Amino acid sequence: MKRLDVAVIGGSIAGLTAACLLARSGHAVSVFERSASALTSRGAGIVTHPGLRSVLERCGSPAAARDLGVTVEGRRVLDQDGRVIAERRLPQVLAGWGRLYRLLLDALPPDRIRFGAALATVDHREDHVVAGFADGHRITADLLVGADGQFSTVRSQFLPAVTPAYAGYVAWRAVVDEAALSPTTRSAIGGHFAFCLPPGEQILGYPVSSLEDGDAARRSFNAVWYRPTQETALNALLTDTGGIRHALSIPPSRIKAEVLAAMRADAERVLAPPFTEVMLRAGQPFLQAILDIETPTMIPARGVALIGDAAFVARPHVGMGVTKAMEDAAALAEALDAAGGVVEAALAAFDGRRRAYGAAVVARGRELGAYLQAQQHGAAERAATERFRSPEAVMAGTAVPPDEILV
Ligand SMILES: Cc1cc2nc3c(=O)[nH]c(=O)nc-3n(C[C@H](O)[C@H](O)[C@H](O)COP(=O)(O)OP(=O)(O)OC[C@H]3O[C@@H](n4cnc5c(N)ncnc54)[C@H](O)[C@@H]3O)c2cc1C
């Protein structure tokens, strides 16, 4: 095996997983993360899938992979009055993002990650890659891994035409301490992956373990409320308290009071009472525009690979962002092992294995979100997508691994 110098850009889920696995294969890995210190959780939950747990085990966290979060036994749909109108058994483990991040960070020797290192440029030469950082320093590597998220600097250097496409709706996310919810709400939705499907909209929620450093006692309830929003109306939502217009998401503390007040009034009007309570109790809800990102290649230049959200972003209905990111990282490490460290052969094999999968996950997200997206369009298009709104279709499709859905 040839021992490679690998630079990983981005120290979040995809980057840390890649770094762990490549270091375990014997490569000299350095992670460059723009944030000045360890990332802090946005507190929300993730749905764990078998692929996530298997990659986590290979990163050196087998015990944690078996005990990641809260298990729910099934799903239920409430009508707008709060009555249960459909149920389905589907056991799943729901974890806090922050716990997974911590496990990966702990699996990597601390001297492998540099915080406060923002990549600015990438050049590829005959047999190596040169990365330039915002503070002026430069490094060379045999392989550069772009794990720098949906607004990837690495991707934009080589594929500037690939940009996020707004899907026509936004998501409000709320996280509340489960113990603070009323007993009625806890029994209605607390132990379930629960949904409510008001006309033109969708809200779902599930409990997550909020433990990050071993505090097993705390549980939160995490809700995501999808709301069709014309592109022109985004302006008002994403313009902050200081008048700055953010592109596709806004720092929660800077959402205008009137925007929050309107959202809360709508929650009382359209949501089942347990979900209304969650939205009203959330101290600082987050707001993000839903988007799709799809790259034509995951190997945009010689010696350069894109993984995770830097390559493909699927709508959250698929519940695959974290699992896909970790599996991309694992596929890259496996391809390098199989090619004995020969970069070009490994990258071709990696792209061959993961590109179609990433595109399929994005396509699945579009399908699951078709009903919400169609709200911007005419009656015919809305009617054609009505089937994606049925309680059975929503319960069967949401956050279920695509392998089980896509042929
Ligand atoms: C702080 C944080 C909290 C999150 N919380 C949740 C959550 O609660 N629930 C959920 O479902 N998803 C969450 N996500 C998103 C989720 O982690 C990703 O969608 C998914 O796991 C794919 O991860 P990724 O590593 O590809 O991308 P990301 O997680 O977006 O990570 C990209 C990383 O690259 C870094 N970066 C970007 N540009 C540069 C640059 N030029 N130079 C160096 N570094 C750069 C970013 O700072 C970031 O750490 C969160 C992401 C972050 C960063």
Image: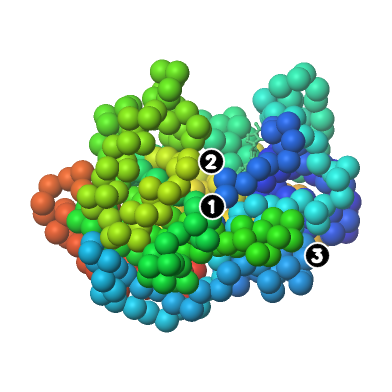
Q: Which residue is drawn at 73% across and 25% down?
A: 133
Residue 388 is left or right of residue 208, and the answer is left
Q: Indicate the quadrant where residue 240 lies.
A: top left
Q: Looking at the picture, which amino acid does disc 1 mark?
A: Ala
Confirm or reject: label 1 Cβ below 8 Å from ligand 1. Answer: yes
Depth check, mark 3 against mark 2: the one in front is: 3
* Residue 138 in picture, x, y percent from top left: 80, 25
Say which of 81 and 289 sits in front: 81
Q: Nearer the viewer, residue 339 or 33?
A: 33
Q: Position of residue 208 (x, y in %)?
A: 55, 62
Which residue in the rendered view is the most extreme toward the left? 379
The answer to whether marks 1 and 3 mark residues whose Cβ atoms lie closer than 8 Å is no
For the residues labelled 3 and 2, the Cα–Cα distance comes to 27 Å
* Label 1 sits on residue: 44
Q: How crowded is mark 1: few (under 14 residues within 10 Å), some or many (20 or more)?
A: many
Please identify, in this view, whether the residue under mark 1 or under mark 2 is nearer the observer: 1
Residue 302, percent from left and from top: 69, 40
For the residues marked 1 and 2, what is the alpha-carbon distance in whole angstroms? 18 Å
Q: Which residue corresponds to mark 2?
A: 150
